[in-house]
Amino acid sequence: MVKMASEPKDIIRIDNIKLLKVISDPTRKKIIDVLYDKPLTASEIAKIISYPKDKIYYHIKKLQSNGILIIAESEIVKGITQNKFINAAKKFEIDSTLIGEENPQSTDEKNDIEIVDHENETVEEEVIKNTDPTEDDQTTTDNNPLLTSLLKAKGKR
């Protein structure tokens, strides 16, 4: 017996940082992306996004508790309740104040979350650039006599 639970809303507005962080997680973004078309079980989601089935539940619960996913239908299979999940809305709209733009971003697929991706890519590039050895490392060791003597003892200076 299949029980229908809820129907998705038309639009959900993402208007706080906490919710934006929840949907910005790469695994959760993949989950959201696969649930636009039809309801899926946790096992089906895990298989589609190539993620361990035992770990997918954490992300599903996080999305569900924050109102991003809903249970579309429930079915008892071999004595176990099996839920099928779907996005809580057909479209997610990110409040423009959260992303520093004048026009709100909306999506019926992936656009809102991709904006966050681009910001993260920039940060990752900066981190990579800042971790490369540079001449600044030379200055740092010159200002630290202990480090300089250790490097000399190891023959690295």
Image (tube, rainbow, N blue to C red):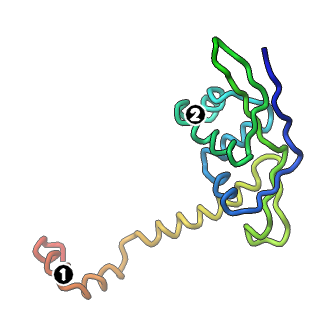
Question: Do the CB atoms of the residues marked 1 and 2 lie less than 8 Å apart?
Answer: no
Q: Is residue 157 above or below residue 127?
A: below
Report x, y in % for residue 130: 44, 72
- On the image, which quarter does residue 84 sit in? top right
Hey, what amino acid is under mark 2? Ser
- On the image, which quarter does residue 46 sit in? top right
2 or 25, nearer to the observer: 2
Q: Looking at the rendering, in which quadrant would you find the N terminus?
A: top right
Q: Is residue 147 above or below residue 96?
A: below
Q: Looking at the rendering, in which quadrant would you find the C terminus?
A: bottom left
Q: Which residue is mark 2?
A: 50
* Residue sitting at x 31%, y 85%: 139
Report x, y in % for residue 107: 82, 52
Q: Element under label 2?
A: loop
Q: Which mark is residue 148?
A: 1
Q: Is residue 75 above or below residue 21?
A: above
Number of disc labels: 2
78 or 125, nearer to the observer: 78
